[in-house]
Amino acid sequence: MKLWEKGIATDQKIEQFTVGNDRELDTVLAKYDILGSMAHAKMLAETNLLSQEEANSLCIALNELLLKIENKNFIIENNFEDIHSKIEFLLIEKLGDTGKKIHTARSRNDQVLVDVHLYLKDEIITIKNLIKELFDLLMELADKNKDVLLPGYTHLQVAMPSSFGLWFSAYAESLIDDITMLNAALQVVDQNPLGSAAGYGSSFPIDRTFTTEALGFSTMKHNVVAAQMSRGKSEKIMAFAMSSVAGTLSKLAMDVCLYLSQNFDFIALPAHLTTGSSIMPHKKNPDIFELIRGKSNKIQSLPYELTLLTNNLPSGYHRDFQLLKEGLFPAIENLKSCLEMTHYAIKDIKVKENILNDEKYKYSFTVDTINQMVVSGIPFRDAYKMVADQIENGTFTVPESTNHTHEGSINNLCLEEIKKKMEFSF
């Protein structure tokens, strides 16, 4: 069944090419298509475009379909073009002429728009919750390991002393920035496009405020052309927010892979989180973090894929938009999986102590020594030259302890302030 069918057969190759894998991807939207249709039916009754009895019958039938979807007992067969045509067919099969009325004052264009907006709202909330769980774990690890020193690097050269407390909480605070990006995406998709029809509104006396409230949107996309233009824009903004999260995960995964190597040997993973080699029996590979890194880097390419798909398209609907789902939907699942697996693996990381006792890290304390000299009255440039001479002559000695007192430094992590910052952003 095709909603646009006029009794003229479509070339099979054309149909296969234009439908693509939409049936499979549309199962993700099935729940939201039902919810949008229920709100639409209620609104049609509210505006006397349907009788209350017809609306009730539609809602009962739609609710039965929703239960099938939630029980994973719903498929879109090949003789249906998409989720919209399958649901309408089932309504007509069950309710006859009443089922034929569900599409009154609606187009597939605003139907898929409202589906995508509702879907992205739910997924943003899920992703935020997964981020919060990872944030809480990182903050717990930061507090637990706040006094365990770690070399800091610039240009991959030993630079200054850091700590595992600083390292863990750095990624925790970075996740707050990612939450901010997701909040921006949520604000964009939390606008009701239903009622914009094919992009130019409807001559029916519909009530868009009714469906906005019924579907739990904070506002509507008022201008009907602007509503249509949100197709592509919403997905792209979502992709940029996901890319921000993925960037944090990718960098963390890279650090873990680096720190696990024998050349660094800062951390260890239990055997159950590593894989082996087919020919080297000593190998314990961090495949889980390499895949998190790879999947996260792939997600970071998504905004540019969606940009190229939608770039320079004029206003109005275009079939190009169908391809947005192919990249976005799997990427959302991959991001959730990466967040879950990062949490699962990070919690069992073992940090090594006394790392900075190794001779090769002694010069990480040169800045601390210079700063102590400056505090005692020696001009900075003179202190710099004096320490440089000590390094050259092999007479440099490591200070007994670090004394970094400013906010956010190794001896003043501001963990409580970071937690409050997350509470405010979340």
Image (cartoon, helix red, strand yellow):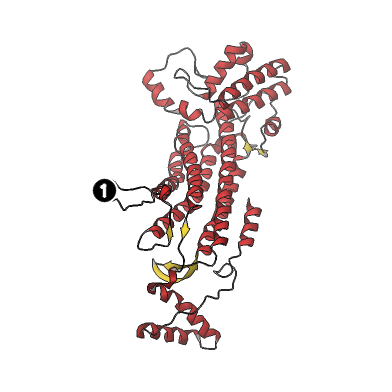
The foreground one among 33 and 318 is 33
Q: Give the image location of residue 171, x and y in percent.
A: 52, 57
Q: Residue at x 55, y 65 (%)?
A: 146
The amino acid on which the numbered mark 1 sits, given as a three-letter code, is: Ile
Q: Quadrant of residue 71?
A: top right
Asked if residue 190 can be seen in this view, the reply is yes
Q: Give the image location of residue 368, x and y in percent.
A: 49, 78
Q: Residue at x 43, y 82 (%)?
A: 397
Q: Give the image location of residue 106, x and y in percent.
A: 60, 24
Q: Quadrant of residue 36?
A: top right
Q: For mark 1, does the 10 Å Cα neighbourhood hold few (<14), some (14 to 19), or many (20 or more) residues?
A: few
In the image, residue 396 above or below residue 356:
below
The foreground one among 207 and 404 is 404
Q: Residue at x 50, y 40 (%)?
A: 332
Of all residues, the one furthest to the bottom in this rendering is: 377
Q: Give the image location of residue 284, x and y in percent.
A: 36, 52
Q: Secondary structure at mark 1?
A: loop
Asked if residue 311 can be seen in this view, the reply is no
In the image, residue 346 above or below residue 51:
below
The residue indicated by pointer 1 is 279
Total numbered circles: 1
In the image, residue 264 above or below residue 199:
below
The foreground one among 296 and 265 is 265
In the image, residue 234 above or below residue 398:
above
Q: Is residue 44 left or right of residue 136?
A: right
The foreground one among 310 and 186 is 186
